[in-house]
């Protein structure tokens, strides 16, 4: 039979003071970093956890006998899971305003973009692509849906209530306006055309992988963009996924 041992009041007060001090210390450390830095976000999150956990744990321990240690058992496993997977951020868009991500976008030796048509993303970030592509030693790989796959184009257009040639025309427009122009300038660009529907958008850089899922319902809706850092288990899985996708896709040749 399990028994819950009640902690002495002085222990609860000591725990609370320790975590309040730790929270204040984390807040102080955030001043050493810029707001966009991962370290700033990390210590800010830790400060919140400490400062919220301290008074909350006292209230809960009084009401139900829960101790601070039990609350932390529920708080810190999330951080451990994030560390295991390498999850460092969640954004509502691809975080290209973040200095680390922006630098990686421009300077990664190998770059992979996986999307259905890619028109909006490439057009919105054309200046970044131009800056990246001007460094001709860097390899840029783009994987889009195959516009000549009539069955796939019909299915995608039907799913999103567009006329049948809608997506085929968008992709062909990206190829003629962006890809062909880049290739004509001898930029190191490779285009792959996928005959299978992409289930997510992927931006794969040397040190980061960012994914965003598509909504099941029709239309465009805001989705979380998950940022994984190299070293976590998910980065390698995404990398392997993209490499396999390239192998199975048709390579575009500029005639």
Image (cartoon, grey):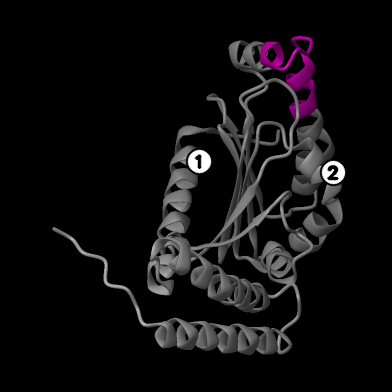
Residue found at the far left of this picture: 1
Is residue 171 within the magenta segment? Answer: yes
Q: Which SS class for mark 2? A: helix
At mark 1, the secondary structure is helix
User: In whole angstroms, how far apart are the C-alphas of marks 1 and 2?
Assistant: 23 Å
Main secondary-structure element of the magenta-colored stretch: helix
> What residue is at 41 percent from the left and 63 percent from the top?
77
Q: Give the percent coordinates (x, y) of residue 21.
A: 58, 89
In the depicted structure, whether residue 195 falls above or below residue 52: above
Is 233 drawn above or below residue 175 in the view shown?
A: below
Asked whether 192 or 72 is in front, the reply is 72
Residue 79 visible at all:
no
x then y, percent, for residue 127: 86, 56
Residue under label 1, please give it.
246
Residue toward you, 50 or 17:
17
User: Which residue is at 61% across, 76% downward?
Assistant: 51
Frontmost of labels 1 and 2 is 2
240 lies above or below 223 = below
Q: Which mark is residue 123?
A: 2
Label 2: how many residues lie within 10 Å, few (<14), some (14-19) or many (20+)? some
Which residue is found at the position 70% from the left and 36% from the top?
Answer: 254
Q: Nearer the viewer, residue 147 or 200?
A: 200
**Residue 28 visible, this orientation:** yes
Residue in the image at 78% along x and 17% along y: 166
The span picked out in magenta is: 157-172
Quadrant for the N terminus, please: bottom left
Q: Residue 69's quadrant in the figure?
A: bottom left
**Snapshot quadrant of residue 3:** bottom left
């Amino acid at each position: 039979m399990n028994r819950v041992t009640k902690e002495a009041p002085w222990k609860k007060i000591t725990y609370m003071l320790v975590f309040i001090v730790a929270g204040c210390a984390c807040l102080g450390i955030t001043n050493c970093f810029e707001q966009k830095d991962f370290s700033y976000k990390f210590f800010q999150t830790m400060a919140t956890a400490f400062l919220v956990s301290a008074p909350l744990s006292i209230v809960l321990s009084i009401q139900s006998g829960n101790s601070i240690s039990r609350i932390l058992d529920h708080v810190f496993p999330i951080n451990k899971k994030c560390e295991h997977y390498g999850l460092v951020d969640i954004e509502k868009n691809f975080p290209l305003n973040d200095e680390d991500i922006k630098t990686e976008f421009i300077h990664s030796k190998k770059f992979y973009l996986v999307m259905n048509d890619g028109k909006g993303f490439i057009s919105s970030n054309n200046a970044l692509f131009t800056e990246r592509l001007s460094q001709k030693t860097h390899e840029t790989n783009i994987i889009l849906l195959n516009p000549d796959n009539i069955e796939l184009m019909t299915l995608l257009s039907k799913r999103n209530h567009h006329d049948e040639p809608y997506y085929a025309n968008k992709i062909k427009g990206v190829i003629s306006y962006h890809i062909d122009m880049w290739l004509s300038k001898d930029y190191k660009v490779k285009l792959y055309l996928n005959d299978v529907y992409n289930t997510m958008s992927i931006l794969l850089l040397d040190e980061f992988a960012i994914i965003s899922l598509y909504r099941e319902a029709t239309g465009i809706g805001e989705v979380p963009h998950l940022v994984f850092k190299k070293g976590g288990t998910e980065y390698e899985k995404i990398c392997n996924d993209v490499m396999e996708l390239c192998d199975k896709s048709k390579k575009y040749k500029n005639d």
